[in-house]
Image (cartoon, rainbow, N blue to C red):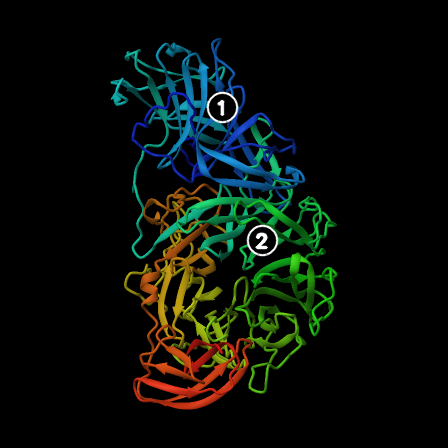
């Protein structure tokens, strides 16, 4: 089905996915199988109407197709379309059309699910009660049996969306089949034979019906006539034209978009790429891998799946959003999805952060405007129940990694408190960062000895807080200044906790690491900052990072190298300044064009926090190059993501100066021009992905995007999160893409060979989440730098009070040994004979150490 708003298409569809039960299920006319991304989910109390009333009459609702279908009792079906935004101050339009069997022989029956899906959903919304709605199951097919005697109605899916079928079993009276519609202004049949229902200046299309029979052998037998619609507008009743057929065989009227286009998706250089979203605005913000290799994503959805229009016709409702977490297994197939939020409409909840503990516990955090989101009763964990309605406050929740069920949740703060980042450390600690205009909550237990505490200062303060054993609130610290300060990201690789963000203050606390460390600023109107704390909350180091203009580092802009403990911060400069850039080793850029807004990468030594590399990232004069996220893989390669807007909107896009191909990996060297159908292109913006070697060489660079066409501020692709996955070595990245009025526009999709979860259909809204992966094998084969050594190739062995480094080219090298806490314990010079180099290390204590050889590094273990 689709809904049109002249002259632009509002939506499109074929009809609904579904399931069958122990009744007759005919083969599909085109032999299509069910789509994993389309299903019908049982209503167990999660659906309410626009008057906030539970709808027990709704038994199932569709997800993954467009428009939404609510399958109700008494043979009733409702189709809905929502035109919403994320602003609670505005009302949103919800359109509803109802359909039911009509006539004296029509029966009122309940729908039955068939072919259960293998993943679950959980709902923890304000209207779902203290325990939420858990373990909701979905089906691939829904059957209304005997809506007329021996006539069944089926809902299911095909390659291009939802389908509906009427199955006339032997013994039926075919003239019984009539449907009554309600909520439309009028009904018509277009030139293609589609049924068009008009309402409020728009229309919904039900595709033409295709008739066929099934013989005694189960084979499809065509008929030589068409099942055209007949319309009686006076009473809103639709019937069918039909002709002779074999009454001893089942007859099927199948309604839905026929298959067209590719039957599989294989984008060269990608291992997997799929949409992830619903029928309105969706975002993916963060990802994490848990022991065993499973992938977890968090984000936000504005989709209207839980809000049912109260009556046929036009309804109005305030916008609402919910946070969610999804789990994918090692085959990239979905296991569960959990939603958290306030009211289904009228309150906004954003899931912006995710963390994990070593034993596999998974956490989601973010912010909400709901005062009724948290229902779970307190246990031994930190628990804050009080919250003001309409005022943003943070929230934290722990979910069961196996089934996504909520184990613990709490508000955190009030008075515009936002949580933007989270990271786990070891088996016991979770750290969150964000901003607030008030004091963050008190502790449950005394803080660690020696930890730092700075109180709230004024305006907007950043903060970092820790939940320790039993998720008790064990430590907190404001990041204060004389103006606005926001902590956006936090990262750790075990030795310390690093926080990055943005500040307008001129007096943040500057803490040198040691005499050689970079600890300086402020620079301009808005600067970035870095703070480093010990794992027990003692401040170790801080600095401004910026230029004389405005600079920003947001979302996932901090990363710590697992091999060297180097710290990287990425972001964007508000102008073309090159103040303070440091070439370091490897690749390097600088620009001083006032028409350019370059991204930046700043790298700080894991030994002394000196600034060892600071480069701009830019395409060309006149570009905006916004770096959003960064991460290291296990071999020390730095991966950076964000978006690029190239050139003036009135000029065509050109090739990227950052483009760098690698055999076997996806390559897009130019930005796709964004289109609005029937008009000129409006801009050229795509996501960008860059990979650097351990010595800062640019190994790989590509755009990633499509023909986004949304009018307004969001008309691009953005990469928000990057995850090198240890299970398969692939590189995963996710974020948002936009299509707006042109759902058929191109985006690089790859079904992963048919095994992974896959959404190919754009369901609506202006933004949709996506997740994609690059295959690990081509990535793991690169990284060789000058001298022929890489982190992965450098090998050291401890024996008899010395470390032997093998296969070093002949020459003299600077050598440094760093302990697990990041402290330099040995600095020396050694010479290799071309095969090995020996470094004597008497009296070195047991433990794991980092060995740096020139600009390369590896680890070794001392065992006594």
Residue carrying label 2: 364
> Where is residue 537 drawn, in percent x and y?
65, 70
Q: Eyeballing the image, is 761 above or below 851?
A: above
Q: Which mark is residue 276?
A: none
Crowding at label 1, few (<14), some or many (≥20) Cα neighbours within 10 Å? many
Name the residue located 57 percent from the left edge and 52 percent from the top edge.
351
Q: Nearer the viewer, residue 86 or 582?
A: 582
> Where is residue 264 drawn, in percent x and y?
30, 44
Residue positioned most to the front: 864
- From mark 1 to mark 2, how far is it between C-alphas? 35 Å
Q: Eyeballing the image, is 711 above or below 774?
A: above
The earlier-in-sequence mark between 1 and 2 is 1
Name the residue located 60 percent from the left edge and 46 percent from the top edge.
406
Residue carrying label 1: 111
Q: Nearer the viewer, residue 115 or 213?
A: 115
Judge left or right: residue 276 versus residue 553: left
> Where is residue 513 drawn, in percent x and y?
59, 81
Q: Can residue 560 be seen?
A: yes
Label 1 secondary element: loop
Judge left or right: residue 15 versus residue 446: left
Q: Can residue 655 be seen?
A: no
Q: Give the total number of marks visible in the rendering.
A: 2
């Amino acid at each position: 089905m689709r809904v049109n708003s002249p002259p632009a298409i509002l939506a499109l569809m074929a009809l609904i996915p579904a399931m069958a039960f122990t009744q007759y299920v005919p083969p599909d006319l085109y032999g299509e199988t069910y789509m994993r991304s389309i299903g019908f989910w049982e209503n167990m109390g999660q659906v309410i109407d626009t008057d906030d009333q539970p709808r027990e009459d709704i038994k199932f609702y569709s997800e993954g197709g467009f428009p939404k279908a609510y399958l109700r009792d008494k043979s009733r079906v409702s189709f809905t379309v929502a035109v919403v935004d994320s602003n609670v101050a505005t009302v949103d339009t919800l359109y509803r059309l109802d359909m039911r069997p009509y006539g004296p022989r029509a029966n009122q029956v309940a729908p039955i699910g068939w072919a259960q899906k293998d993943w679950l959903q959980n709902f923890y919304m304000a209207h779902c009660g203290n325990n939420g709605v858990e373990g909701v199951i979905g089906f691939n097919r829904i059957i209304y049996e005997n809506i007329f005697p021996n006539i069944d109605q089926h809902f299911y899916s095909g390659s291009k969306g939802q389908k509906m079928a009427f199955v006339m079993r032997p013994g039926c009276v075919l003239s019984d089949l009539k449907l009554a519609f309600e909520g439309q202004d009028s009904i018509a049949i277009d030139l293609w034979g589609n049924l068009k229902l008009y309402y409020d200046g728009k229309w919904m299309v039900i595709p033409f019906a295709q008739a066929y029979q099934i013989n005694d052998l189960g084979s499809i037998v065509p008929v030589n006539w068409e099942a055209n619609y007949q319309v009686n507008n006076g009473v809103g009743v639709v019937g069918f034209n039909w002709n002779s057929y074999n009454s001893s065989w089942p007859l099927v009227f199948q309604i839905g978009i026929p298959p067209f286009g590719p039957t599989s998706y294989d984008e060269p250089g990608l291992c997997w790429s799929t949409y992830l979203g619903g029928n309105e605005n969706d975002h993916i913000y963060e990802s994490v891998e848990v022991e065993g290799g499973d992938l977890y994503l968090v984000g936000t959805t504005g989709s209207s799946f839980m809000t049912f229009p109260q009556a046929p016709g036009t309804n109005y409702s305030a916008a609402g959003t919910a946070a969610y977490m999804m789990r994918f297994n090692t085959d990239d197939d979905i296991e569960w999805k959990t939603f958290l939020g306030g009211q289904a409409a009228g309150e906004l909840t954003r899931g912006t952060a995710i963390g994990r503990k070593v034993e596999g516990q998974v956490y989601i955090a973010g912010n909400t405007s709901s005062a009724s989101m948290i229902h779970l009763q307190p246990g031994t964990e930190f628990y804050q129940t009080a919250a003001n309605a309409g005022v943003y406050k943070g929230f934290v929740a722990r979910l069961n990694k196996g089934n996504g069920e909520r184990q613990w949740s709490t508000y955190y703060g009030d008075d515009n408190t936002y949580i933007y980042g989270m990271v786990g450390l070891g088996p016991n600690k979770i750290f969150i960062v964000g901003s607030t205009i008030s004091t963050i909550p008190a502790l449950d237990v005394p803080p660690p000895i020696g930890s730092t505490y700075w109180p709230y200062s004024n305006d907007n303060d950043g903060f970092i807080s820790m939940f320790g054993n039993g998720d008790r609130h064990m430590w907190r610290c404001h990041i204060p200044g004389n103006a606005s300060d926001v902590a956006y990201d936090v990262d750790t690789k075990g030795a310390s906790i690093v926080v990055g963000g943005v500040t307008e203050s001129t007096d943040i606390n500057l803490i040198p690491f040691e005499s050689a460390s970079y600890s300086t600023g402020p620079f301009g109107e808005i600067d970035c900052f870095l703070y480093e704390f010990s794992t027990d909350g003692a401040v170790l180091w801080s600095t401004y990072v910026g230029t004389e203009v405005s600079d920003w580092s947001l979302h996932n802009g901090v990363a710590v190298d697992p091999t060297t403990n180097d710290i990287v911060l990425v972001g964007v400069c508000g102008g073309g300044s090159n103040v303070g850039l440091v070439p370091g080793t490897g690749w390097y850029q600088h620009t001083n064009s006032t028409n350019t807004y370059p991204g930046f990468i700043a790298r700080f030594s894991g030994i002394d926090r000196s600034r060892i590399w600071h480069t701009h990232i830019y395409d060309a004069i006149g570009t905006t190059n916004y770096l959003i996220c960064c991460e290291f893989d296990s071999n020390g390669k730095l991966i950076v993501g964000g978006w690029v807007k190239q050139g003036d909107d009135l000029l065509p896009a050109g090739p990227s100066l950052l483009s760098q191909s690698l055999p076997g990996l996806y390559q897009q060297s130019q930005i796709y021009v964004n289109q609005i159908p029937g008009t000129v292109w409006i801009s050229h913006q795509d996501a960008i992905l860059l990979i650097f070697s351990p010595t800062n060489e640019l190994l790989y660079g590509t755009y990633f995007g499509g023909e986004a066409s949304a009018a307004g501020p969001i008309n691009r692709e953005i990469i928000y999160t990057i995850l090198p996955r240890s299970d398969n070595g692939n590189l995963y990245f996710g974020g948002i893409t936009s299509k707006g009025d042109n759902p058929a526009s191109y985006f690089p999709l790859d079904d992963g060979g048919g095994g992974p979860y896959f959404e190919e259909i754009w369901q609506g809204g202006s933004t949709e989440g996506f997740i994609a992966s690059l295959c690990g094998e081509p990535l793991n084969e690169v990284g060789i730098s000058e001298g022929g050594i890489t982190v992965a190739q450098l090998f050291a062995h401890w024996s008899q009070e010395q470390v032997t480094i093998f296969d070093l080219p002949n020459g003299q090298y600077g050598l440094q040994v760093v302990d697990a806490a990041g402290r330099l314990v040995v600095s020396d010079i050694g010479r290799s004979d071309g095969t090995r180099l020996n470094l004597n290390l008497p009296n070195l204590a047991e433990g794991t150490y980092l060995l740096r050889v020139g600009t390369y590094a590896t680890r070794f273990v001392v065992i006594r």
